[in-house]
Amino acid sequence: MYQPVVPTGGLAGWRFLQKTYDIQREAFNQSAQLTRETDYFRENIGKVTSAKDLVDDRQLLSVALGAFGLQDDINNKFFIQKMLEEGTTAEDALANRFTDKRYKELSEAFGFGPNEFSPTAFSSFAERIVNLYETASFEVATGNVDETLRLALYAERKLPELAAESSTERSKWFSIMGESPLRAVFDTVFSMPKAFGQQDIDKQLEVFQERAERMFGSSDPAQFSDPEKLQALMTKYVAMSQINAFNANTSSGSIALMLLQS
């Protein structure tokens, strides 16, 4: 598998990755392992007519879950099958009960629920899932080099989609807080302590809104449909991650040594 090239960390690494993204993605997509996975999906997904068919084929399921960033659920077959079979049309469907919208996106995409239409037989569906899988796989591979940059790539891709939704400001923030990669980005930018996530959810919302207003001029996540606002957020996230990593790796003793040596 092609390994993304990130010659340095922090903002310099982020800017390098942005400049070389298209070239690196092309090389990554041509990797033998990725090609085998996506070719298998294209050739076989059309035979899948039920949630059980999908979860019984680990290779197909791996691509399906990976496309939505849910690859860690590969062994939770019963859970995934139930979620797909319930669909998303009923308000109390399993996928609708998660604040993490990736489960709903997966279930909606495959359309195995009651009164839903499954598009698995169409080649356009296979291409859509493959494209998502290739993108998500590149982000995962980038995370093997630098986890901060993986989250930055994910947020840069997902936030404009969320910002463009017709849902309310509160709903958008709850989606961000429920989707762990996005949550990690904002927790870092807003300097939230680890215990903050244990507070009352409405209190968390209030703090997120206040800090977004102070840092970016608006409390509404819809502002991140603006490329300039999005890049400002990404820059703050990568810079704060770099500072936090430096502080974590620099003990008081090493600081004293540095001062003495200077």
Image (cartoon, grey):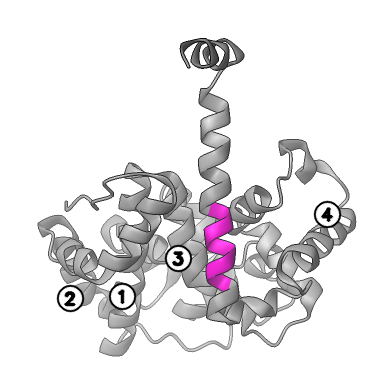
Q: Amino acid at mark 1?
A: Asn
Circle 4: is it few (<14), some (14-19), or many (20+) Cα within 10 Å? some
* Nearest-to-viewer mark from 3 and 4: 4
- Does dot 4 land on a helix, a strand or a loop? helix
Query: Up-down: is 229 above or below 179?
Result: below
CB under 8 Å between discs 2 and 4: no
Residue nearest the observer in this picture, 184 or 121: 184
Q: Please state which of the two labelled residues, at mark 3 or mark 2, is closer to the viewer.
A: 3
Rendered image: mark on residue 158: none
Which badge, 1 or 2, is on the more N-terminal residue? Answer: 2
Numbered circle sitting on residue 68: 3
Disc 1 designates what residue?
A: 131
Q: Is residue 95 above or below residue 166?
A: above
Residue 99 occupies quadrant: bottom right
Q: Secondary structure at mark 2?
A: helix
Question: Please, what is the three-letter code of the amino acid marked with disc 2?
Answer: Glu
Q: Do labels 3 and 2 touch, CB within 8 Å?
A: no
Q: In whole angstroms, how far apart are the C-alphas of marks 3 and 2?
A: 20 Å
Q: Which residues are magenta?
A: 230-237
Q: Tell me if residue 231 is in the magenta stretch.
A: yes
The residue beneath circle 2 is 43
Asked which quadrant contains residue 197, the reply is: top right
Question: Which of the two discs, 3 and 4, labels the residue nearer the N terminus?
Answer: 3
Distance, label 1 to label 2, CA atoms, is: 15 Å
Real-space Cα distance between discs 2 and 4?
46 Å
Distance Cα–Cα, label 4 vs label 1: 34 Å
Kind of residue at disc 4: Gln
What amino acid is labelled 3 in the image?
A: Phe
Q: How would you rate the neighbour count of disc 3 (Cα within 10 Å): few for under 14, some for 14-19, many for 20 or more?
A: many
Work out whether mark 4 precedes mark 1 in sequence or the reverse, and give the earlier one: 1
User: Please, is residue 156 above or below residue 241 in the view?
Assistant: below
